[in-house]
Image: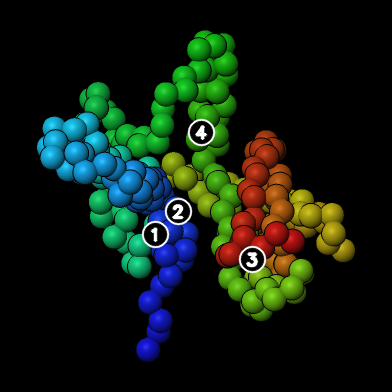
């Protein structure tokens, strides 16, 4: 049978989120109030409207109201997924739009903070042009990583990674002549080229850390495009 947690252990656990900090503050307030009242004169107990008595009576009600407001309206800011035994319970409490509403033609909405706006019209125009060019090119660089050997010390982990070209916007890989990859300089051969359209011009790597990959895509019409991909790995190893 496990021993019950000590007050220190409980306090340490409560201090991980705002509601816990408020709870610890309440304990502190009542501890101080208890000390003050214990030293009060006998006349104190004959005055039900004494400020200290009113405070001790009203304070819990105010705290309960504050707790209710915070939990209902600021749930996402009070807790993190790791505070739950089952992290799925965290996401069940989030407010999710019942339907996607917006201007005609919109197919999705951004749920992240959009308070930061691009005020510079020229910068926004340039960004729109770059994004249009990215989409009109019709190809994207993807990757998938799997663990071969779990990391136990620096550079001990081994990961098998596939990098490949994917067509979008109804484009065909048959229009591509070759893809030349540039990988991390630690490789014996950092520049690798392939013309195998049947495999999506894929590149297979055995690695121990994360790094960016640059792909130079050449079409059969002679045009060239650059695509980038950062190779992130399961567990995000630092090396």
Which one is nearer the viewer's eye here, 32 or 15? 32
Q: N-terminal of the two: label 2 or label 3?
A: 2
Residue in front for this viewpoint, 114 or 59:
59
Q: Is residue 94 above or below residue 120?
A: below
Label at residue 16: 2
Q: Earlier in the sequence, mark 4 or mark 1?
A: 1
Q: Which residue is mark 3?
A: 161
* Label 4 – label 3 distance at C-alpha: 27 Å
Give the quarter of the image for residue 226: top right
Q: How far apart are labels 1 and 3 at the CA level?
A: 32 Å
Local SS, label 3: strand
Q: Is residue 122 left or right of residue 221?
A: left
Q: Going by the image, does 107 lie left or right of 46?
A: right
Mark nearer the viewer, 2 or 4:
2
Front label number (2 vs 3): 2
For marks 1 and 3, the one nearer the N-term is 1
């Amino acid at each position: 049978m496990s021993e019950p947690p000590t007050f220190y252990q409980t306090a340490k656990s409560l201090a991980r989120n705002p509601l816990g900090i408020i709870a610890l503050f309440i304990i502190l307030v009542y501890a101080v109030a208890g000390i003050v009242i214990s030293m009060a004169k006998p006349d104190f107990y004959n005055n039900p409207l004494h400020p200290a008595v009113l405070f001790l009576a009203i304070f819990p009600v105010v705290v309960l109201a504050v707790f209710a407001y915070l939990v209902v309206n600021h749930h996402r800011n009070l807790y993190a997924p790791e505070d739950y035994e089952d992290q799925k319970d965290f996401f069940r409490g989030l407010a999710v739009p019942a339907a996607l509403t917006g201007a005609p033609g919109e197919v999705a909405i951004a749920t992240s903070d959009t308070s930061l706006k691009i005020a510079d019209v020229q910068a926004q125009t340039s960004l729109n042009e770059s994004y249009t060019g990215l989409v009109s090119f019709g190809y994207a660089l993807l990757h998938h990583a799997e663990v071969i050997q779990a990391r136990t010390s620096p550079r001990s982990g081994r990961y098998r990674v596939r990098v490949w070209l994917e067509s979008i916007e109804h484009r065909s890989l048959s229009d591509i002549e070759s893809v030349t990859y540039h990988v991390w300089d630690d490789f014996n051969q950092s520049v690798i080229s392939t013309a195998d359209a049947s495999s999506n011009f894929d590149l297979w790597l055995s690695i121990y850390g994360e790094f960016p990959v640059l792909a130079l895509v050449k079409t059969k019409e002679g045009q060239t495009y650059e695509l980038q991909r950062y190779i992130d790995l399961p567990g995000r190893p630092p090396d």
